[in-house]
Amino acid sequence: MHSPFNLQKPIAIGSDHAGFDYKEELIFLAKGFLFKDFGTHSKDSVDYPDFAHPVAQAVENDEAAFGICSAARLMGWPYYGQ
């Protein structure tokens, strides 16, 4: 499989409480890929910047191939991924 990303590096992934199930399902379905999970690690209510910022930072610092953020509405997340 050809990819424009360096898949020798992990994929940074994070979610707020509303996106927790989506994040866990993606990690489960994408077997064979490396992930760095920035949380959240439960369905307890949290603020998305606490998880979106570390995902974006990992990509910016070249510690991750790319980042995925999961939330119910994704409002505000694109600002952290740019």
Image: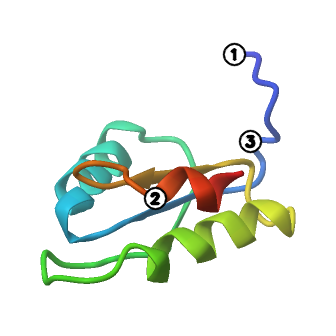
Above or below residue 31? Residue 51 is below
Q: Residues within 10 Å of mark 3 (few under 14, many from 20)?
A: some
Q: Secondary structure at mark 1?
A: loop
Q: Amino acid at mark 1?
A: Met
Task: State how far apart marks 2 and 1 are (Cα).
Answer: 32 Å
What residue is shown at x 69% (from left), y 48% (from top)?
66
Above or below residue 65? Residue 42 is below
Quadrant into which the N terminus falls: top right
Q: Amino acid at mark 2?
A: Gly
Q: Report which residue position mark 3 lands on.
A: 7
The answer to which of 52 and 24 lies nearer the viewer is 52
Task: Residue 12: name its quadrant.
Answer: bottom right
Q: Secondary structure at mark 3?
A: loop
The answer to which of 56 and 1 lies nearer the viewer is 56
In the picture, measured across the screen, residue 80 lies left or right of residue 21, that is right
Q: What percent of the width, then of the height, locates residue 36? A: 56, 67
> Which badge, 1 or 3, is on the more N-terminal residue?
1
What residue is shown at x 30% (from left), y 47% (from top)?
28
What residue is shown at x 51% (from left), y 41% (from top)?
32
Q: Report which residue position mark 2 lands on.
A: 76
In the picture, measured across the screen, residue 73 lies left or right of residue 57, that is left
Q: Secondary structure at mark 2?
A: loop
Q: Amino acid at mark 3?
A: Leu
The answer to which of 72 and 62 lies nearer the viewer is 72
Q: What percent of the width, then of the height, locates residue 43? A: 13, 75
Q: What percent of the width, then of the height, locates residue 16? A: 30, 69
Select label 2 or label 1 by which is in front.
Answer: 2
In the picture, measured across the screen, residue 71 lies left or right of residue 63, that is left
Q: Report which residue position mark 1 lands on.
A: 1
